Amino acid sequence: MSKLDFLHEEIKNLKESGLYNHIRTISGPQGAWFVVDGKKVLNLCSNNYLGFANMPELKEAAKKAIDEYGVGPGAVRTISGTQDIHVALEKKLAEFKHAPACIVVQAGFTANTVVIPTITGAGDVIFSDELNHASIIDGCRLSKATVVRYAHNDVADLRAKIIENKDKARRMLIITDGVFSMDGDIAPLPDICDVADEFGAMVMVDDAHGEGVLGDSGRGIVNHFKLEGRVEVEVGTLSKAFGVMGGYVTGEEILIEYLKQRGRPFLFSTGLTPADTAAAIAAVDVLLESDTLVRKLWDNAAYFRAGLQKVGFQTGKTETPITPVMLGDEKVTGEFSKRLYEEGIFASGITYPTVPRGKARIRCMLSAAHEKSDLDYAIEKFEAVGKALGVIK
Ligand SMILES: *Cc1c(COP(=O)(O)O)cnc(C)c1O
């Protein structure tokens, strides 16, 4: 008997309901190809949009920072853990995002818990897209504000929910993902900003899958829609297109100053390591210098999508390099992903409850690290498996 025996029951339930995560182990760096559980496969499921995770410029910057600053920052940012490279990264990100100021924290997930409960509280109402990321949901749970969910990307529903709640709200905050990671669709941010202005609500966008991807040189969704100055809070991650680790918030000076006084994960958890910080600076420098990789990412995505559609696959409503191959059936999707792996392709099957029942898919993440020959290989294997399983003719 152990006091933890109840967890055996929980794990058994997860396995029986198909919700148990089998975690694969990767050897070596992220790239177009990588080694998964000892087998070399084409990587179609990382968020390494620009190939930065193993880029020489970033690795050199990280090594140099270790020599210059050591491996750890030594304390939380507010005591003695703010190094000059943290300040330099914040300045660089603000410049990149065309925003007045920036605060860098440990992760994108953390960034949402730094900002949401800090700027909202009892008496406020948060309007949150029903498909928002888990870290937004947790950020909302940490707030004493009332949370009202609106239908996905449905500005008419958002407006109706605001009208329903506005009289009892001290302040209102609308929160949306910029790019939704399961379908690759983009939030209707211009219309959201219009509704926000109509009722005096603040707007916050989490651009984790948009930065490095959308906008001029990958500046993200706000730049993409030319909404600079109309979105109060922008959240970002350094772990997807930027290829490293960390998160950030950009916005007006007063917002960032307040988060540095009151954001609990900033106050009570040590900041980024010198190596991460320097690598992130190098990532922004690469983007400030040239948009070659961003263009290659989009070229690859268009090429891959066209290739899949030509052999008969449906690629859903994506507007970004996230490419869902819609299969519908949960079982078929599981089998499809298994056969792809046998054929040397690693692409994740996404099923209920991550997406609704009957909307199962293989989600392919494109990258500037891919070459056309890699994508030809993938299209050929998708076609073969699709025909074998009767998904396409
Ligand atoms: C991935 C993701 C995060 C978390 O970012 P990390 O830096 O990995 O913690 C937050 N928000 C959204 C929308 C994401 O897609």
Image (cartoon, rainbow, N blue to C red):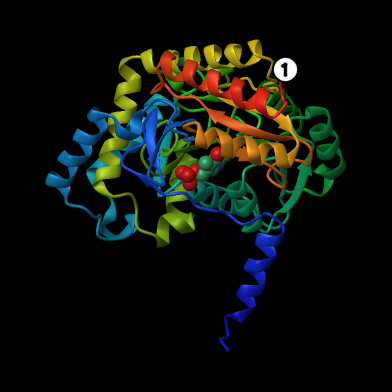
Q: Residue furthest bottom?
A: 1
Whether the residue under disc 1 has CB within 8 Å of ligand 1:
no
**Quadrant location of the N terminus in the rendered image:** bottom right
The residue positioned 46% from the left and 15% from the top of the image is: 216
Given residues 298 and 193, the one toward you in this image is 298
Q: Residues within 10 Å of mark 1 (few under 14, many from 20)?
A: few
Horizontally, residue 272 falls left or right of residue 317, namely left
Amino acid type at image mark 1: Lys
**Quadrant location of the C terminus in the rendered image:** top right
The residue positioned 81% from the left and 38% from the top of the image is: 162
Kind of element beneath mark 1 = loop
In this rendering, the answer to whether 209 lies above or below 74 is above
Q: x and y percent of residue 59 in the render?
A: 23, 35
In this rendering, the answer to whether 237 lies above or below 72 is above
Whether residue 157 is visible, yes or no, is yes
Q: x and y percent of residue 232 in the render?
A: 57, 34
Q: x and y percent of residue 343 in the render?
A: 50, 31
The residue positioned 38% from the left and 17% from the top of the image is: 293
Q: Residue furthest front?
A: 388
Q: How many marks?
A: 1
Q: Residue 382, located in which quarter of the rendered image?
A: top right
Whether residue 186 is visible, yes or no, is no
In this rendering, the answer to whether 113 lies above or below 342 is below
Q: x and y percent of residue 57 in the render?
A: 23, 28
The residue positioned 61% from the left and 57% from the top of the image is: 20
Q: Residue 245, located in which quarter of the rendered image?
A: top left
Q: Which residue is mark 1?
A: 393
Q: Residue 257, located in which quarter of the rendered image?
A: top left
Horizontally, residue 147 falls left or right of residue 306, namely right
